[in-house]
Image (cartoon, rainbow, N blue to C red):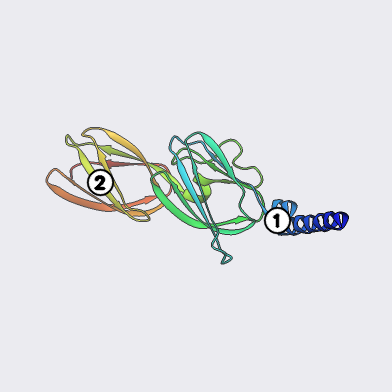
Amino acid sequence: MIQITKAKKFWLGLLVAMLVLAALPSTSLAAEDLVRFRVENRASRGITVRLYSRDGTGRAYYMHIEPLTTKSMSPIRGIYDYRLTACGIMVTGTVNLTKPLTWIMPECGDKGGPGTKAANTQDIGRDILKLVKIKLVNRTDVDMRIWLEGPFPYSFLIPAGGSKTVSILKGSYVWHHFACGNFDSGNLFANNAKTKVLECD
């Protein structure tokens, strides 16, 4: 009788172990379904990346990358909508993560640099943000504020007799400023680095 009881316990324990193992996810299968997404931040400001799955599962991923650091995540392979916050703006788009991918973030307004043309690599500055540097020169003897309306709204204060170099989204803008008792406006096409001189008419 004692031997029968021990046998029942043995088989019962074996059955429980098999059921537990069957309920666990397959590690090898999960590894095959994951992909490495690496973000290298070479800028002096932090950036944030959010990913949202497009397959209806509701999966989402979040990663903040401090200045001059690199981080990686391993989402499930697929196509994602992204939301990138960098250089004081937020841009959205779609990213293909069916294979490993590296994003490289240069200084705001810059593009290119070591490794940016490597396979499975994207230059955030050139391919995603598409920022250009504009030098604003104030040739008056008073502080001047300029407003830009276009792909993204901006407002900059330039000190009297000074200048400021800013990074803005590529595109067409309408600018406004008030100086010397007059309100003035005009057009600015930011397609590459240029200088905009502000002065009294």
Residue found at the far front of this picture: 1
Q: Which residue is mark 2?
A: 146
Relative height, residue 178 to residue 42 (above, below): below
The image position of residue 113, as x and y in percent, is 56, 37
Left or right: 76, with 4 as reference point: left
Q: Name the secondary structure under disc 1.
A: loop
Most foreground residue, 128 or 146: 128
What kind of residue is marked 1?
Leu
**Residue 169 visible, this orientation:** no
Quadrant of the rendering where the C terminus is positioned: top left
Q: Which residue occupies the foreground of this view, 132 or 76?
A: 76
Quarter assignment of residue 55:
bottom right
Say the numbered circle drawn on residue 24: 1
State the residue at coordinates (47%, 56%). 92
Please name which of the two marks, 1 or 2, marks the residue nearer to the observer. 1
Few, some or many C-alpha atoms within 10 Å of disc 2 (few <14, some 14-19, many ≥20)?
A: some
* Mark 1 vs 2, N-terminal side: 1
The amino acid pointed to by label 2 is: Ile
